[in-house]
C-alpha cells in the first residue's frame, strides 16, 4: 500500500512506551471512534508490530492502520483476563475492523390461513391477509423441516391449488397415489376431516413430535374402543408416518448428544463459516456467515468462535476444521460462561471428520453463491488451499508431466485449471531438448526453466496472456525427485510447487511439499480436484508422446503397459496385426494371447 499514516511515527513512539504485560488495546480513528479491539500477552510487542514495516502486514491490517489516529489500552492481570475483556469490548463497541457476524437469514413465521380449507406455509414476514402467524422462529431450517414433516404425516397438499374453488377440476396427482396427499382436489376427503388434519398439523409443529404421538395414540384407542376401525386405522397410519419422520431426522446423527461442527471456506476476498448444530444426537440447525477473508486462518477461526459464542450457548464439544489460535484460553472462557467443560477439537478420522466434510461443503456452497462461482470448484479450491497452507485459493493452477519410452521421444505436457476448471486453450507442449536417457527429474527442470524464460520474455506485454502471467500454484505429476529438481526455480519466482504422488494402483494418494507428504482422503473435495488434474496432465502428455512416436512407437506404447514386455508385444501384434485392433479388443479376446490380469491392464490402458 503506497499510502502511509502521517501519524505513524507518533503511534510507534507511543507503542514503544507500553508495558510488557497482558492487556487489551483499542485503536481509534480521527473522530475518536474505536475501529479495532485486540488483546495481547505482551502489549508493547503486539502494538508496536502494527507501526513498523507496513509491507509485512496483511492488506486488511494495513488499511486499518491507515485510519488509526490514536489508541488506548487496558492492562490486565493475565492473558485470559485480557481475552474476556477483549470479547466484552468488541460486543460493546462493534469495531469496524473486527470480525462482526451477521447471520445469513432473518426470522421466520408459520402462516395458518384458517377458514374451511386452511393452508400452512413458512414466510419471512407477516402480511395483512387475515391469516394467523406463529413465531417468530429464529431457525428457518427447523420450522421448514417441521412443516415438511407435518405435511407428509397429515397428508396435506403441497400444490398451489385453491379450495374449494379447484375441487373436482383435476384428477389426483402422484402424491395421492403414493400416500402423501389426501387429494381434496378430487373430493377424496371431506372438508371437516381436511380442517381437522390441518389443525393437528399446526399443533404438531407448535408442540413437537412427542405431544403429537400422545394425541394420535389416544385418538386411535378411542376410535378402536367405539369400534370405528376405519378411523383407528387412519390414526395408526399417521402415527406410523410420525415415527418414520422422526427417525429420518436422525439420519445425520452424532454420538455426542450436544455438539457444534464448524468449517470455513475462503475464496478471493470473502470467507464463509458454516455451523452445524446437534442436539439430542441429531442435526437440529445449520447457519452460515459471510465475512471478509482473513490471511491468518488460525486467528480467523479463533475470532469467529469468540464472536459466535458471545451470543450463543457453547455446547460441550466444538469440532472445527483446523487449528485455533489461543484454543485453551477460549475453551476456558466458554466453559466459565456455560458453567461446564467445553472442548474445541480438530478431528482427523471417523464420524466427526465426516461431519467436518459436511460442514465444509455447506460453507463452500454458501460462499460459491455469494461470489458467483461454481459450488464444487469453490469448495475444492478452498480445501486445497488449507491443505497446502496457501494464503488464498489458487485461481490458476499449472500442472506438468513428462512422457517417454525408455528415454526415447521424451516430451512434456502442461495443463491449466482456472477456478478449478480445465482451460484447454492454455495447454502447452514441450519437446525435451537437453535432458537425456529418460531422466524425468532433468526433463521436468528443463520444462519449468523454459516456461519461466517465456514469462521473462512476455511479462511486460501490453496484453499479457499465456506464459506472461505466473500461476498461483504448480502441481507436478511426481514425487520428491521432481519437486527437488524445480524447487529453487519456483522459489525464485515465488510460485508454490507440490508433487502429486500415486499409490501402487496408480491412484492419487498424497501431495508432497517441502514439509513432507499430505495425505489426500477420497472423501474430500480437494481429492477430486487433484485427481482430475493428475489424470488430465498424464493424458495430455502421453497423447503428445504417442503422436510424436507415430508408427515407430507402436511397440513403445505397448511397453508402457504394466505386465507387457517385448515378447508379449510381438505376440499381440502377431494376433491382432495393428495397434488400433488391440485398442478395440475385449478382455476376453486379449486373454487368448496374455494372462487375464495383463489383458485387463491393456484394456484399461486404452479405455
Image (cartoon, rainbow, N blue to C red):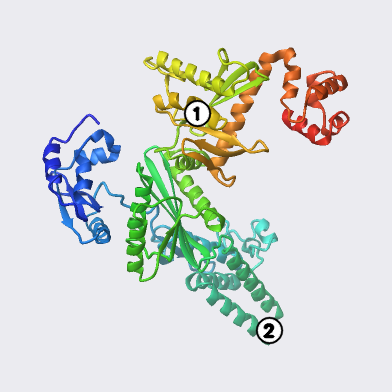
Q: Nearer the viewer, residue 199 or 100?
A: 100
**Badge 1 element:** helix
Asked if residue 102 can be seen in this view, the reply is no
- Image check: 332 left or right of 146? left
Tag on residue 159? none
Asked if residue 111 can be seen in this view, the reply is yes
Question: Which residue is found at the position 57% from the left and 12% from the top?
Answer: 433
- Where is residue 149 shown, x and y percent of the image? 56, 64
Q: In the rendered image, which quarter is residue 592 located in?
A: top right
Question: Which residue is found at the position 53% from the left and 77% from the top?
Answer: 211
Q: Nearer the viewer, residue 336 or 249?
A: 336
User: 10 Å neighbourhood of mark 1: few (<14), some, or many (≥20)?
Assistant: some
Task: For marks 2 and 1, give the CA distance.
Answer: 80 Å
Foreground: disc 2 or disc 1:
1
What is the quadrant of the C terminus in the image? top right
What residue occupies the far bottom of the structure in this picture? 225
Tag on residue 484? 1
Q: Nearer the viewer, residue 520 or 415?
A: 520
- Residue 530 in the image: above or below residue 140: above
- Where is residue 29 shown, x and y percent of the image? 16, 45
* Residue assigned mark 2: 224
- Image check: 359 left or right of 507? left
What is the number of callouts on the image? 2
Q: Nearer the viewer, residue 7 or 199?
A: 7
- Residue 75 in the image: above or below residue 509: below
User: 10 Å neighbourhood of mark 2: few (<14), some, or many (≥20)?
Assistant: some
**Badge 2 element:** helix
- Residue 100 in the image: above or below residue 560: below
Q: Earlier in the sequence, mark 2 or mark 1?
A: 2
- Where is residue 556 shown, x and y percent of the image? 73, 19
- Image check: 379 left or right of 189? left
Amino acid at each position: 500500500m503506497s499510502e502511509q499514516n502521517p501519524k505513524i511515527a507518533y503511534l510507534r513512539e507511543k507503542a514503544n512506551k507500553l508495558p510488557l504485560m497482558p492487556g487489551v488495546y483499542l485503536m481509534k480513528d480521527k473522530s475518536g471512534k474505536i475501529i479495532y479491539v485486540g488483546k495481547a500477552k505482551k502489549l508493547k510487542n503486539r502494538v508496536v508490530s502494527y507501526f513498523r514495516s507496513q509491507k509485512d502486514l496483511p492488506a486488511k491490517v494495513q488499511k486499518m492502520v491507515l485510519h488509526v489516529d490514536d489508541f488506548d489500552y487496558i492492562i490486565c492481570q493475565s492473558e485470559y483476563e485480557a481475552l474476556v475483556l477483549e470479547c466484552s469490548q468488541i460486543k460493546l463497541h462493534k469495531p469496524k475492523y473486527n470480525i462482526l457476524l451477521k447471520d445469513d437469514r432473518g426470522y421466520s413465521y408459520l402462516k395458518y390461513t384458517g377458514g374451511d380449507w386452511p393452508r400452512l406455509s413458512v414466510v419471512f414476514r407477516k402480511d395483512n391477509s387475515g391469516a394467523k402467524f406463529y413465531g417468530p422462529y429464529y431457525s428457518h431450517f427447523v420450522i421448514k423441516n417441521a412443516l415438511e414433516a407435518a405435511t407428509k404425516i397429515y397428508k396435506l397438499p403441497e400444490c398451489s391449488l385453491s379450495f374449494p374453488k379447484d375441487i373436482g377440476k383435476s384428477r389426483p396427482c402422484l402424491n395421492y397415489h403414493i400416500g402423501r396427499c389426501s387429494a381434496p382436489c378430487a373430493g377424496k376427503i371431506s372438508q371437516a376431516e381436511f380442517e381437522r388434519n390441518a389443525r393437528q398439523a399446526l399443533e404438531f409443529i407448535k408442540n413437537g413430535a412427542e405431544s403429537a404421538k400422545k394425541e394420535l395414540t389416544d385418538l386411535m384407542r378411542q376410535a378402536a374402543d367405539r369400534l370405528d376401525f376405519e378411523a383407528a386405522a387412519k390414526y395408526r397410519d399417521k402415527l406410523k408416518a410420525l415415527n418414520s419422520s422422526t427417525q429420518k431426522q436422525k439420519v445425520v446423527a452424532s454420538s455426542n448428544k450436544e455438539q457444534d461442527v464448524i468449517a470455513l471456506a475462503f475464496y478471493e476476498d470473502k470467507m464463509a463459516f458454516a455451523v452445524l448444530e446437534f442436539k439430542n444426537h441429531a442435526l437440529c440447525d445449520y447457519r452460515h456467515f459471510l465475512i471478509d477473508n482473513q490471511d491468518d486462518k488460525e486467528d480467523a477461526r479463533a475470532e469467529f468462535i469468540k464472536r459466535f459464542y458471545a451470543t450463543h450457548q457453547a455446547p460441550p464439544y466444538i469440532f472445527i476444521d483446523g487449528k485455533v489460535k489461543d484454543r485453551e484460553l477460549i475453551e476456558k472462557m466458554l466453559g466459565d460462561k456455560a458453567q461446564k467443560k467445553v472442548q474445541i477439537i480438530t478431528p482427523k478420522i471417523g464420524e466427526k471428520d465426516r461431519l467436518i466434510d459436511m460442514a465444509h461443503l455447506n460453507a463452500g456452497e454458501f460462499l460459491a453463491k455469494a461470489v458467483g462461482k461454481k459450488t464444487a470448484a469453490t469448495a475444492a479450491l478452498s480445501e486445497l488451499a488449507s491443505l497446502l497452507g496457501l494464503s488464498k485459493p489458487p485461481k490458476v493452477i499449472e500442472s506438468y508431466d513428462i512422457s517417454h519410452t525408455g528415454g526415447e521421444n521424451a516430451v512434456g505436457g502442461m495443463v491449466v485449471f482456472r477456478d478449478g476448471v480445465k482451460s484447454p486453450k492454455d495447454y502447452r507442449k514441450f519437446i525435451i531438448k537437453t535432458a537425456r536417457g529418460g531422466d524425468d527429474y532433468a526433463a521436468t527442470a528443463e520444462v519449468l526453466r523454459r516456461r519461466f524464460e517465456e514469462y521473462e520474455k512476455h511479462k511486460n506485454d501490453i496484453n499479457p496472456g499465456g506464459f506472461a502471467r505466473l500461476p498461483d500454484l504448480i502441481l507436478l505429476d511426481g514425487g520428491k525427485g521432481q519437486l527437488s529438481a524445480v524447487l529453487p526455480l519456483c522459489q525464485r519466482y515465488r510460485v508454490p510447487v507440490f508433487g502429486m504422488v500415486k499409490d501402487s494402483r496408480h491412484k492419487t494418494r498424497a501431495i508432497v511439499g517441502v514439509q513432507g507428504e499430505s495425505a489426500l482422503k477420497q472423501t474430500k473435495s480437494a481429492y477430486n480436484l487433484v485427481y482430475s488434474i493428475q489424470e488430465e496432465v498424464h493424458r495430455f502428455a502421453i497423447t503428445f508422446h504417442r503422436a510424436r512416436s507415430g508408427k515407430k512407437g507402436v511397440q513403445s506404447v505397448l511397453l508402457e503397459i504394466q505386465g507387457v514386455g517385448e515378447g508379449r508385444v510381438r505376440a499381440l501384434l502377431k494376433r491382432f496385426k495393428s495397434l488400433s485392433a488391440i485398442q478395440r479388443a475385449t478382455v476376453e479376446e486379449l486373454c487368448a494371447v496374455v494372462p487375464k490380469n495383463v489383458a485387463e491392464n491393456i484394456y484399461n490402458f486404452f479405455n
